[in-house]
Image (cartoon, rainbow, N blue to C red):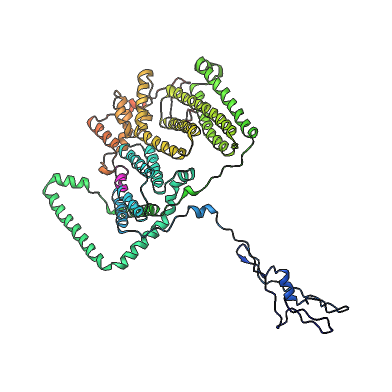
Amino acid sequence: MPDTPSHSNEKPEPASAPDADPQPRPPRATAGGQDIGDAVPGPRAVRAHTGAPARAAGAGQSRPAPRRPAPSRQQWQPPRHDPPVWIGEIGSDEPARVSVATLWCVAATGLLSALLLGDGLGLNLLIVTVPAALATYFAARDAGRRLRPWTLVWAIGGVALLAVPALRDAGWPTFLAVTSALALGSLALHGGRTWPGVLLGPFGLFGSLGTGLFWGFQGVRERAEGSRGRWAPVVRTAAVAVVLLIVFGALFASADAAFADLLGALTPDVPVADGPWRTLLFVLGVVGALAAAHTAAAPLRWDRITVRPGPARGRVEWALPLIVLNLLFAVFIGVQLTVLFGGYDKVLSETGLTYSEYATQGFWQLLGATLLTLLVIGLARRWAPRDGAGDRRLVGAVLGVLCVLTLVVVASALRRMDLYVDAYGLTRLRVSVAAMELWLGLVIVLIMAAGAFGGRWLPRAVAVSGAAGVLVFGLISPDALVAERNIERYGTSDKIDVNYFQQLSADAVPALDTLPEPLRSCALEGIERDLGDADEPWYATSWGESRARDILAERPIDPQWEECSSMNLRNDSGGERDLYDDGRTGDGY
């Protein structure tokens, strides 16, 4: 505090005099990271700046008018918004420096991608996967990560899915298998045991595309600067080895025709015109392998995202809508049982619907009801009351009844599909949506088991069931199943659509080969045209395609255009031909 002036006629010194002992200024406050100590001065700081006396000089002495503080010159700035907390939580540590073994595996992945993947998909996907997997192994080992049981499960599942394009020729199962293999591979790199980890893990690999490339470039530059003298011998050795292989390989090929055929079958044929395409495949292989290795070295921690349950609702507010929904399901199932015991013919005669209209009208709606039920169960678990044992029993009872009723709805949808297939045959789309409905029923069973025994394992179980479903779907070969089922239907109903068979893949050839002529030649004409005359390399040819070529070579087809065009059979619903998937008869699928 400054010295207090005496009661005299002397004019007191202001508190801001040079020889006065000034008051200590308050600490500078901050808001949003901005220093606001000058913008909002405290009351003591105002007195220090205005120079107001600590005490009046005496009676009748006029008090000097206080000066207003000068306005702050600091401009207003909007407050900073920090990123969400979960972004920092899932962030990974800085990866270790890329090792030489990882770089060699990445280079091998790019080279094999350029040489093998340009001719198609088959066994070459498994071949390219081997060095890429080794690159991730070396990167994870350098980062100190250990191999865990679930990592091994995801890795084995991904490799098993890559067997589908090596065995089957159909495009849709191959696409599903390759996509699912990438998802399982990303789960193996990240790890995942919670719903965020399982759902977001497959997308984490794409986040490492840019960072992985920069990480690999840094590793190559550091090693190139530190070992320039050792690169020259390696390059010379590789060049000499390549020259010796070319020279002696050409000599041996010219000396023996069998060796020349073997060498030509094993060596990829890379035309000069394919240079840009092969270069692009090399770049994609390198970038993909580096992204996988970088993810293995520094994965994102998706499991750290915490999904908190929503605010618990009251029992009536939460349970009453679900009880009403259960009653609606029960009424619908009662009608379905009546139809089942009363017969479809009675229902069709009363409603005036055809088999196609009745099955189509029901299946898609029931499939949508199954998906919506899963959504309702998830939302109900989020807002369910959880104060005591009574609340837990109520939640289990209401949701358990809903799951059981939904399983009955799934069975009803599959029955409608079976009814439609009996009337009009099996197609790719029909077998696909039926497989989807079966998997949804399995998910509901897993949810019921989680409600009874605890659900920590549920995310991984759903992921495993989905991958297993894709694997089984590819291995059973939907095109072969379609051909076999329709040939059986032809034996009992004398109905067949030969034009649809021409759209199938080579997987259907063994089944179609059992048809009598001229049906056989007409059904196989389109498949033989798609196969073509040129033999593809062994690494880009599936087992199904190779088997189809052998069958067609052993028993050539001889289609007659007049006979094939006359096979325009009609179905029982109004005299229109069943066109399967083209939608012109109003079937929809």
Q: Of 137 and 255, which appears nearest the observer?
A: 137
Q: Position of residue 386 (x, y in %)?
A: 59, 37
Q: Of 544 and 316, which appears nearest the observer?
A: 316
Q: Quadrant of the N terminus?
A: bottom right
Q: Is residue 112 left or right of residue 412?
A: left
Q: Position of residue 56 (x, y in %)?
A: 82, 77
Residue, x 61% and y 32% (percent of image)?
319
Q: Of 439 and 55, which appears nearest the observer?
A: 55
Residue, x 73% and y 78% (percent of image)?
2
Residue, x 56% and y 44% (percent of image)?
308
Q: Position of residue 305 (x, y in %)?
A: 51, 48
Q: Of 4 and 440, which appears nearest the observer?
A: 4
Indicate whether 228 appears above or below 244: below
Indicate whether 576 appears above or below 70: above
Residue 122 located within the stretch drawn in magenta: yes
- The reply to whether residue 560 is in sight is no
Q: Is residue 137 left or right of residue 457?
A: left
Q: What is the magenta segment's predominant secondary structure? A: helix
Query: Which image quadrant for residue 15?
Result: bottom right
Query: Which image quadrant for residue 335?
Result: top right
Q: Which residues are magenta?
A: 119-129
Q: Is residue 210 left or right of residue 352?
A: left
Q: Residue most toward the front?
A: 6
Indicate whether 544 appears above or below 34: above
